[in-house]
C-alpha cells in the first residue's frame, strides 16, 4: 500500500517570492509520482510527473519537482510565483506494475499575495 | 477543458435517496476512474473501469456501485444516502492501463445530502 504526506496544509507567500511545497511518500513497491493542481471550483489538472530517468522534472509554467528516492520525497518548487498560481496542489503516487489508481496527499493550499 | 464531462454539476438530495452521477471520458480513452473528495478524507479512489470491465476497487462503500457502458461512458450510483456522503465526486479518464499515464479529470459533481 502507498501513502502520501504533504507536510504543509497552507502556504502563504508574496508575489515573486520562491516557494517549495513538500511531499513525502511511503510505498513497498516502486511508484510513479505526480503533482496535480486544482484551481477554485475546477477539476484537477496535471502539473508534472516523474516516471523514470532524470530526477528533475519541469512543467511548462515554471514549476519543477525533484524525485529523491533515498528520502522518498518529491518536493515542488517555483523560483518566483504569480498571483495566478493561487490554487490547491496535490501530490500523488501510483504503483508501478499494479493498479493505476492515484493515491493523493491531503493537499497544500498555496495563496500568493500581492 | 480536460475533455471529460460530468453531469450534473450539482445535486441536492435527502438522506435515504439514490442518485446517479454520469461521466463521459475523453475521446479514445478506455479507462475511467471515480474519486471522492471530502474535507475529512481528502481525495479517495473509489473504482476503475477499463473498456467495460472493473479493473480496480478502492474504499468504495457497498451502497455505491458503478458501471461502464459499451460507449465507454460511466455511471456511479449512490444509494441509501447519508449525510456523510456529501462530497465532490470526480471522474477521470486515461487511455488504457499503462503505468504512469496521465489521468484527465472532469469538473466534478458536488453532492449535498440534507
Image (cartoon, rainbow, N blue to C red):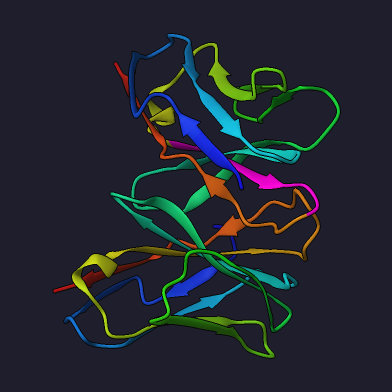
Looking at the picture, tell me which residue is in the foreground, B27 or B47.
B47
Report if residue A94 lies within the magenta region: yes
Does the image show residue A106? yes
**Most extreme residue toward the right, as rendered?**
A53
Quarter assignment of residue B94: bottom right
Using the image, determine if residue B28 lies above or below residue A16: below
Report if residue A72 lies within the magenta region: no
Using the image, determine if residue B9 lies above or below residue B75: above
Q: Give the overall secondary structure of the magenta segment.
A: strand
**Residue A4, horizontal then vertical, whole percent:** 53, 37
**Residue B1, horizontal then vertical, whole percent:** 54, 57
Magenta extent: A89-97
**Most extreme residue toward the left, as rendered?**
B114
Q: Residue at x 48, y 82 (%)?
A: B65
Quarter assignment of residue B38: bottom left
**Residue A31, horizontal then vertical, whole percent:** 72, 40
Q: Residue at x 44, y 52 (%)?
A: B43
Q: Residue at x 61, y 23 (%)?
A: A73
Q: Residue at x 70, y 59 (%)?
A: A99
Does the image show residue A91? no
Looking at the picture, tell me which residue is in the foreground, A69 or B25.
A69
Amino acid at each position: 500500500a502507498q501513502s502520501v504526506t504533504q507536510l504543509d496544509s497552507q502556504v502563504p507567500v508574496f508575489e515573486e517570492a520562491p516557494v517549495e511545497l513538500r511531499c513525502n511518500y511511503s510505498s513497498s513497491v516502486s511508484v510513479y509520482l505526480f503533482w496535480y493542481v486544482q484551481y477554485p471550483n475546477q477539476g484537477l489538472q496535471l502539473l508534472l510527473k516523474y516516471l523514470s530517468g532524470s530526477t528533475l522534472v519541469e512543467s511548462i509554467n515554471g514549476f519543477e519537482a525533484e524525485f529523491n528516492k533515498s528520502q522518498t520525497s518529491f518536493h515542488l518548487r517555483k523560483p518566483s510565483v504569480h498571483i495566478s498560481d493561487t490554487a490547491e496542489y496535490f501530490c500523488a503516487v501510483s504503483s508501478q506494475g499494479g493498479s493505476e489508481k492515484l493515491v493523493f496527499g491531503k493537499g497544500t493550499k498555496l495563496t500568493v499575495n500581492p | 477543458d480536460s475533455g471529460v464531462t460530468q453531469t450534473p454539476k450539482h445535486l441536492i438530495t435527502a438522506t435515504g435517496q439514490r442518485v446517479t452521477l454520469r461521466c463521459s471520458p475523453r475521446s479514445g480513452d478506455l479507462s475511467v476512474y471515480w474519486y471522492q473528495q471530502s474535507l475529512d478524507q481528502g481525495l479517495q479512489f473509489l473504482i476503475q473501469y477499463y473498456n467495460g470491465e472493473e479493473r480496480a476497487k478502492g474504499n468504495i462503500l457497498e451502497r455505491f456501485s458503478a458501471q461502464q457502458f459499451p460507449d465507454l461512458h460511466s455511471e456511479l450510483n449512490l444509494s441509501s444516502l447519508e449525510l456523510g456522503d456529501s462530497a465532490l465526486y470526480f471522474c477521470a479518464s486515461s487511455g488504457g492501463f499503462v503505468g504512469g499515464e496521465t489521468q484527465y479529470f472532469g469538473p466534478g459533481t458536488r453532492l449535498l445530502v440534507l
